[in-house]
């Protein structure tokens, strides 16, 4: 899969740190939500993905982190359409990766192809 990345490693890491802070705030405000446990697990899953992406970006650079993110995204089971409080970890990971793709300006066609490669939850 081909893609063009215009952001530097530093810009990617800075963006991911920003997303991690937002997820941390969501973890802290989880008790105030209608479903605190699912909300917390969703936010924690996002934080973990952002941390791992930052780690890969710092170690291997922009192209490698995008490739890693696409492979991780393709490996996630497709759970869209399930009840809101089901599979919060998977949905959190999916949300984090989609935010990352938007942040780096990944081509919508590439995102669609990766989404189509995902298998439904068995």
Image (cartoon, helix red, strand yellow):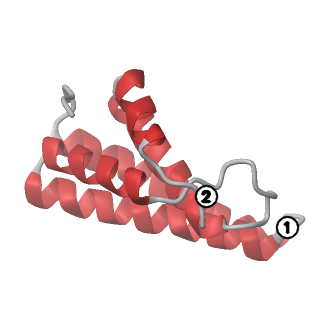
- The front one of 113 and 62 is 113
53 w.r.t. 112: above or below: below
Viewer-nearest residue: 41 or 85: 85
Extreme residue toward the left, this view: 60
Q: Earlier in the sequence, mark 2 or mark 1?
A: 1
- In this picture, residue 68 sits left or right of residue 109: left
Nearest to the eye among marks 2 and 1: give it.
2
Viewer-closest of 34 and 10: 34
Q: Is residue 118 left or right of residue 63?
A: right
| Observer-nearest of 106 and 2 | 2
> Mark 1: few, some, or many residues within 10 Å (few <14, many ≥20)?
few
Which residue is labeled 1 in the image? 32
Q: Position of residue 80 (x, y in %)?
A: 67, 49
- Which residue is pictured at 76% across the width and 76% down the height? 37
Residue 72, label in figure: none
- Note whether residue 40 is visible: yes
- Where is residue 26 shown, x and y percent of the image? 66, 61
**Label 2: which residue?**
91
Quarter of the figure with the C terminus: bottom right
Residue for point 46% across, 49% down? 118
Element class at badge 2: helix
Q: Position of residue 77 (x, y in %)?
A: 53, 59
User: Distance from label 2 to label 1 (Cα)?
Assistant: 20 Å
């Amino acid at each position: 899969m081909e893609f063009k990345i215009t952001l530097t490693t530093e810009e990617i890491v800075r963006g991911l740190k920003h997303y991690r802070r937002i997820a941390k705030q969501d973890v802290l405000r989880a008790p105030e939500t209608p479903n605190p446990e699912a909300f917390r697990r969703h936010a924690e899953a996002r934080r973990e993905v952002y941390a791992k992406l930052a780690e890969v970006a710092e170690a291997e650079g922009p192209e490698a982190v995008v490739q890693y993110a696409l492979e991780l995204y393709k490996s996630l089971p497709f759970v869209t359409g399930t009840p809101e409080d089901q599979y919060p970890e998977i949905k959190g990971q999916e949300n984090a990766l989609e935010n990352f793709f938007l942040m780096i300006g990944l081509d919508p066609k590439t995102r669609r192809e990766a989404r189509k490669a995902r298998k439904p939850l068995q």
